[in-house]
Image (cartoon, grey):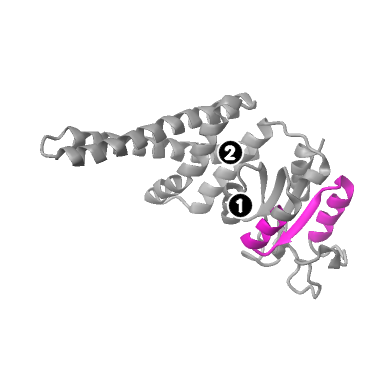
Amino acid sequence: MSSLIQVNERKRLFIGLLTASLLTAGGLALAVWYLIVSPQQSAAYQLVLLVLILVLVGTVVLVGFGLAGILLTLWLSKNVKWLQGPMRIALNTFFPLVLGVGKVFRIDMDRIRNSFVQVNNQLIEAMHIKLKPESILILAPHCLQRSSCPYKITTDIENCRRCGKCNVDDLLKMRDEYGVNIGMATGGTLARKYVKEYKPRAIVAIACERDLTSGILDANPIPVLGVMNIRPHGPCVNTCMNVPTVESAIQQFVR
């Protein structure tokens, strides 16, 4: 129960900041409107401001619908298809503004990113996507491999000797069991290469908060279920993962 409450709090953080970002954009639109009606402004200047306010109002309305779609999807646990476009705009376009608002309130950036991943995962789960295993890609960070291991697996994961001293062996077991594809990435460039190579229709990504959020946004519109890695030795070295959570994410997609 405690973990469920924690997850709900994480979702509320991103939703709250997205709402605050929407209100900020709405306030900016009102400020621009005040400048338009000010008699001191020239006609040309007012025209420029009018275009700006139309863009702002249009964005605020779209993101408002997107926020409503996100709330409805989270509440119903059911995909709201006709709001998919505005939801995508709300998540992708407003994410930098959400981080900015969070920075103003001195909220830890990783907490916000974690909350975004939780919201994203529930939205993806609500879509009830079922695919053939070969259409699914597991993207994992190379830091899952034990740092003292002499075998290089980022270019060829088959180089893994499957000694069981790190989670790479677990990933290979799941690949063999479910028939999905897998890629070990050292960063965004290699991750994008795997996406281009395998052309997945869904991705299970394991990474830290920063890499997961950027990966989810980059991969759009490909659905990505994000799983946070565990970092007992700090970032980027000898990390590990919750195996049942990764397996559950794969099962979400497998037909």
What predominant SS class does the magenta segment belong to? helix
Residue 237 horizontal side relative to residue 37, left or right? right
Under circle 2, the secondary element is: helix
Q: Position of residue 8 (x, y in %)?
A: 58, 36
Label 1, label 2: how many angstroms apart (C-alpha)?
Answer: 15 Å
**Residue placed under numbered mark 2 in the picture:** 119
**Residue placed under numbered mark 1 in the picture:** 215
Residue 119 horizontal side relative to residue 182, left or right? left
Q: Amino acid at mark 1?
A: Gly
Q: Position of residue 85 (x, y in %)?
A: 54, 33
Q: Amino acid at mark 2?
A: Val
- Whether residue 242 is visible to the viewer of this picture, yes or no, is no
Please tell me how many numbered marks the rendered image carries. Answer: 2
Residue 171 horizontal side relative to residue 71, left or right? right
Query: Could you tell me which quadrant the C terminus lies in?
Result: top right
Residue 157 magenta-highlighted: no
Residue 25 horizontal side relative to residue 141, left or right? left
Query: Could you tell me which quadrant the N terminus lies in?
Result: top right
Picture quarter containing residue 248?
A: top right
**Closer mark to the observer between disc 1 and disc 2:** 1
Viewer-proximal residue, 216 or 74?
216
Residue in the image at 69% along x and 53% along y: 206
Viewer-proximal residue, 228 or 44?
44
Viewer-proximal residue, 170 or 135?
135
Viewer-proximal residue, 216 or 171?
216
Residue in the image at 89% along x and 47% along y: 177
Residue range corresponding to the magenta coloring: 167-195
